[in-house]
Amino acid sequence: MTSRPELKAPPEIFYNDEEARKYTSSSRIIEIQAQLTERALELLALPDDGVPKLLLDIGCGSGLSGETLTESGHQWIGFDISPSMLDVALEREAEGDLILGDMGQGLGVRPGVIDGAISISAVQWLCNADKSCHEPRKRLKSFFESLYRCLARGARAVFQVYPENLAQRELILGYAMRAGFAGGVVVDFPHSAKRRKEYLVLTCGPPSLSSATPKAKGEDEESCSDEESSGDEENQTVSISDRHRPRKKQKLNKKVKGREWVLRKKEQMRRKGNAVPQDTKYTARKRKARF
Amino acid sequence: MRLLTHNMLSSNIKGVTNGFPLRIEVEKVVEKSVDFNPDFLKNMLAKIEYKALVEASRIMGYAELPDHAEPSMLESDDFLRKFHHALMELHLEEGTLVCPQTGRKFPVNKGVPNMLLHEDEV
Ligand SMILES: C[S@@+](CC[C@H](N)C(=O)[O-])C[C@H]1O[C@@H](n2cnc3c(N)ncnc32)[C@H](O)[C@@H]1O
C-alpha cells in the first residue's frame, strides 16, 4: 500500500480521532511540525518590528504549527477540515482561533486584512477528488483566489508541501500564479531523501525585489559544480533543485518501477479527472538505451 | 472564537455579495485574559470594521466601546484597553453565526465555527 495519506482517504476521514491522537503523543511529529513551521515563518520574512502580526494557518490541525506561531508572538486564525484534529487543538489550548472549514471551498475572510499565511503539509490534499463533486482544479482555484484576496498587499504565504510528483507541484504552483501570486519553490536539502523539504513561497502583488524566492538550505551539500551553478546567486526566482542536479545522478537515483505500478498510478490520475492515455501493450515497456 | 476573528470572517456562500458581518446569536460567552499589546492594537484598528465590532461586542454583553473610533483615540490608554477587551478577550463559545444575506446559519460549538458549505453552496 501507498504511504501517502492523501491516497488513503479524504482528510476529514483520514484524520480521525486515532490519527489526531498521534499528534499529541508522538514527539517525532511534534518536533517535525515545529521545525517545518519555524522554517515557514523564516521564509514569510515578516517585518522585524516586534509587532505581532495576524496570520492564517491553513490546515492548522492539532495546533502544533500554531504553537510555534504563538511562541513567536503572533496572533493566528486556523482553518481545518477535520473535527478530530481541531478537538486535539482545543485540548492543547491552542491560542489561535480555530475554524472548521474546507480550504477547497475558498476562505471566507475579508479582503486585505491578513499579514501572512502558512500551511504545513496540507495543500497537497487539494489535488485529490474525494467526493464526486470535487474537481481539484476548481478547488485549487477557489483556494488561491480567496487567499490572494484576504492577504494584505506585499504579504506572503508559505506552504510546506509534499507533492506526489513534479506535475502535482506544477499544478499547485500554476494555480497560485494564476490567482496573482509571484514566487516559486524553495527546496531545502534537495539531495537528501529524508531531510528534503519543499516550500512554496508566494507573494501577494506584482513581482518585486521582495518577491524573489529565498535561498534554500543545504543546496550545496553535495557538489554539483556544473556549468550552471555559477549564475545561481543572482537568479533566485525559482530554486527548483532538480534543475541543478547533475544529469548522471538523476538517472542513478531513479528506481525502476514496474508495469503494475504505472497502471495503478494511471488509474489514480483518471480518478482525479486527469486526461490519461489508454493502457496498451506499450504501457511501461522498457525503452531502448537510446531513446 | 474572538471578535477579532468574527471581524475578519465573511459568508462564503456562492452568489453572496454581502457576507459581512455575520450576525451573532449568543448562547454562551467566555472571557479569557490575553496580554495587552498596544502596538498590535494600533495596527488592527486600521483593519477592523469598527462598527461591526461595536455591534458584536454589545451582542456579547460588553457595552463599553464608543460608537465611533478616531485615530486620536489611539493615544488613549483607556480606549485601547476597552478595544483590547472587546477584540481579544470575549469569546463566542456556543452560538450561531448567520449569513446576513441568506440567513444560513453556521453553528459555533466549543468556540469553533463550522463554516463548511454544502455542495450546492460552493
Ligand atoms: C499533516 S496535517 C498538519 C497538521 C498541523 N499543521 C498541526 O500542527 O497539527 C494536515 C492537515 O491538513 C488538513 N486538511 C486537509 N485537507 C484540508 C482542506 N481541504 N481544508 C482544510 N484542512 C485540510 C487535515 O485535516 C490535517 O489536519
Image (cartoon, coloured by chain):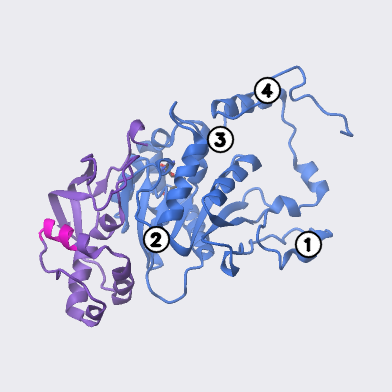
Tell me the shade of chain A: blue
Residue carrying label 3? A3
Residue carrying label 4? A260
Query: Alpha carbon of mark 4 to alpha carbon of mark 2: how far?
Result: 48 Å
The amino acid at mark 2 is Gly
Query: Alpha carbon of mark 1 to alpha carbon of mark 3: how far?
Result: 34 Å
Q: Is residue B106 rendered to the left or right of residue A254?
A: left
Tell me the shade of chain B: purple
The amino acid at mark 3 is Ser
**Chief secondary structure of the magenta portion:** helix
Q: Chain of mark 3?
A: A
Residue B81 in the image: state x and y as whole percent: 19, 74
The amino acid at mark 1 is Ser
Q: Is residue B48 rendered to the left or right of residue A118?
A: left
Looking at the image, the residue that sits furthest to the top is A281
Q: Chain of mark 4?
A: A
Q: Quadrant of ligand 1?
A: top left
Q: Which mark is residue A112?
A: 2
User: Callout 2: helix, strand or loop?
Assistant: loop
- The front one of B33 and B115 is B115
Q: Are marks 1 and 3 in contact (CB under 8 Å)?
A: no
Specify the segment rendered in magenta. Answer: B54-61
Residue A210 in the image: state x and y as whole percent: 57, 68
Residue carrying label 1? A229
User: Nearer the N terminus, badge 1 or badge 3?
Assistant: 3
Asked if disc 3 is less than 8 Å from ligand 1, the answer is: no
| Mark 2 vs mark 1: in front | 2
Residue at horizontal 33%, vertical 37%?
Answer: B117
Q: Is residue A214 rendered to the left or right of residue A90?
A: right
Query: Alpha carbon of mark 2 to alpha carbon of mark 1: how far?
Result: 39 Å
Q: Are marks 2 and 3 in contact (CB under 8 Å)?
A: no
